Image: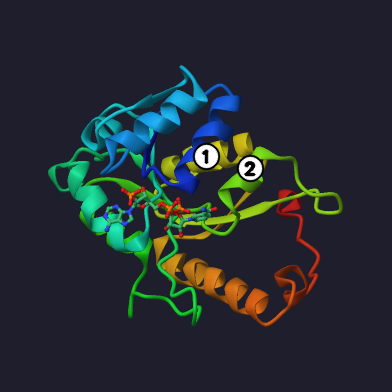
Amino acid sequence: MRIGILGTGVMAAALAEAWTRRGHRVLVGGRSQDKARAIAERLGEAVEAAVPVRVARESDAVVVAVAWEGVDQALALAGADQGSLAGKTVIDCTNAVDYTSGLLKPSTGSAAQRIAERAVGSHVVKALHLYAGTSWLAPAPPGRPERTVAMCGDDETALGVAAGLVRDLGGTPAVTGGLEHARQLEGVAGFVMRLVATGHNPVTAVPAVPAVDRTRD
Ligand SMILES: NC(=O)c1ccc[n+]([C@@H]2O[C@H](COP(=O)([O-])OP(=O)(O)OC[C@H]3O[C@@H](n4cnc5c(N)ncnc54)[C@H](OP(=O)(O)O)[C@@H]3O)[C@@H](O)[C@H]2O)c1
C-alpha cells in the first residue's frame, strides 16, 4: 500500500520507518520540505518526500501526524478542502491535549471530527494516538504481548484499512464505535498523561476485565 503521512516530526518518521519495514511505500510531506526530504533520505527508497497535496492525492491512506495547532494548515496545504482526500482513509493520530493539565483543547467534539469536517469526503479513523510512534519500531515489551490500539470511525472500509495498518505495526486493533467516540478516545491520552505525571503506571489504572469471546455469538 502507498501510505501518505502529513507531518515531518517524530511521529511521522517513526510510522514511516515501521511501515516500510513491513513492505509499504510511504509519501511524506509537511510545511517543511527540507524535513520531509531528511526523513526520506534517512529511510531509503521506500520513502519519498512530496508536497502535501501530492501526499494526499497519490496515497491510498493518509495519516495526519502534526501538532494539533498545525492541523488546519496541514490540511489546507494538502488541498483537503478541495477534495484531495475524498474517498480515502484518513487516520488521525493527533493529541489535541494540553500536556500540563491533560485536558482536551477542543471544548466540544474532537480533533478527529474537526479533521472530518475539513477533509471533505474523507473517511476519518481516530487511531494510533496513544502509543509512542517509536514503540512500533520494537517488539512489545516482555509481559505485554498485546498492544491494543483503540480506534473509531464511521466507515467500515476505512476501519478495515486502518486495522490492517495497525496489525502491520504489531498492534491489535479494537474498534470502539463510530466517530462520535473520538472525544472519548482522545481524552484517554490526557488521562494517561495525568497518571504518569502523578507517578502511576497507566496500565494498572484500568481493571483487568476478561474479554468476552464474541466469535461464539
Ligand atoms: N511522537 C509520538 O510518539 C506521538 C504518538 C502519538 C501521537 N502523536 C501525535 O502526532 C502528532 C505529531 O507529533 P510529533 O511527536 O511528530 O510532533 P513533532 O515532532 O513536534 O512534529 C510536529 C509536526 O507538526 C507540524 N506543525 C506544528 N505546528 C504546526 C503548524 N502551526 N502548522 C503546520 N504544521 C505544524 C510540524 O511542522 P514543522 O516541523 O515544520 O514545525 C511537524 O511536522 C501530534 O498531534 C502528537 O500528539 C505523537
- Per the image, the residue denoted by label 1 is 15
Q: Residues within 10 Å of mark 1 (few under 14, many from 20)?
A: many
Image position of 23 (left or right of 157): right
Query: According to the image, what is the colour scheme of the structure?
Result: rainbow
Number of numbered discs visible in the structure rendering: 2
Residue furthest to the right:
143
Helix, strand or loop for disc 1: helix
Residue furthest to the top:
45
Closest to the observer: 122 or 25? 25
Q: Is residue 105 visible?
A: yes
Q: Position of residue 205 (x, y in %)?
A: 73, 76
**Of the image marks 1 and 2, the number of the one nearer the N terminus:** 1
**In the rendered view, would you say 112 is above or below 192?**
above
**In the rendered view, would you say 196 is above or below 113?**
below
Taking the spot 25% from the left edge, 37% from the top edge, the residue there is: 52
Q: Position of residue 17 (x, y in %)?
A: 55, 32
Q: Quadrant of residue 85?
A: top left
**In the rendered view, would you say 211 is above or below 199?**
above
Q: Is residue 60 visible?
A: no
Q: Residues within 10 Å of mark 2 (few under 14, many from 20)?
A: many
> Are the residues tagged 1 and 2 within 8 Å (C-beta)?
yes
Disc 1 to disc 2, C-alpha distance = 7 Å
Q: Position of residue 11 (x, y in %)?
A: 49, 47
- Per the image, the residue denoted by label 2 is 136
